[in-house]
């Protein structure tokens, strides 16, 4: 499972970070950091990753 992030759409509120702190983070400027961008999300983080996708209020994350 991969998660595609639309960095232009992201508004940096961090709901995804709350759901999946091992997958996402915000840097000091509240820009999204996707630890597995372009890579498979490790199996142990998949459930949290799906919750993060569902939590994003601006649909900046999608499964691939
Ligand atoms: S929940 Fe969506 S808008 Fe908020 S930081 Fe995550 S990707 Fe960006």
Image: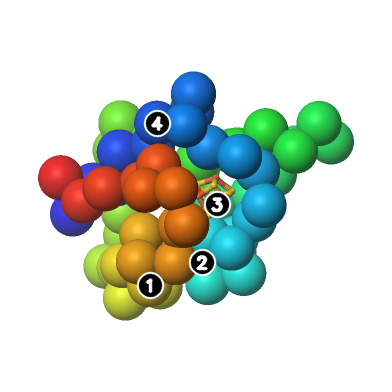
Q: How many residues crowd around disc 2 within 10 Å: few (fewer than 14), some, or many (20 or more)? A: many
Badge 4 residue CB within 8 Å of ligand 1: yes
> Residue 3: x and y, percent?
29, 46
Q: In screen coordinates, is 13 left or right of 63?
A: right
Residues at circles 2 and 1 in contact by the CB criterion of under 8 Å: yes
> Residue 62: x and y, percent?
26, 48
Q: Residue at x 36, y 59 (%)?
A: 53
> Which residue does the numbered mark 2 point to in the structure image?
20
Give the CA distance from mark 4 to mark 1.
Answer: 17 Å
Give the CA distance from mark 3 to mark 2.
Answer: 6 Å
Residues at circles 3 and 2 in contact by the CB criterion of under 8 Å: yes
Dot 4 or dot 3, earlier in sequence? 4
Residues at circles 2 and 4 in contact by the CB criterion of under 8 Å: no
Give the CA distance from mark 2 to mark 1.
Answer: 7 Å
> Which residue does the numbered mark 3 point to in the structure image?
24
Q: Secondary structure at mark 2?
A: loop
Query: Relative to the observer, which residue lies in front, 11 or 46?
Result: 11
Q: How many residues crowd around disc 4 within 10 Å: few (fewer than 14), some, or many (20 or more)? A: few
Tell me, for residue 6, which label it has, or none.
4
Q: In screen coordinates, is 42 left or right of 34?
A: left
Badge 2 residue CB within 8 Å of ligand 1: no
> Which residue does the numbered mark 1 point to in the structure image?
51
Badge 3 residue CB within 8 Å of ligand 1: yes
């Amino acid at each position: 499972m991969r998660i595609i992030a639309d960095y232009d759409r992201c508004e940096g509120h961090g709901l995804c970070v709350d759901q999946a702190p091992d997958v996402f983070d915000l840097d000091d400027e509240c820009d999204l950091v996707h630890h597995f961008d372009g890579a498979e999300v490790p199996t142990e983080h998949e459930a949290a990753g799906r919750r993060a996708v569902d939590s994003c209020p601006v649909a900046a994350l999608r499964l691939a």
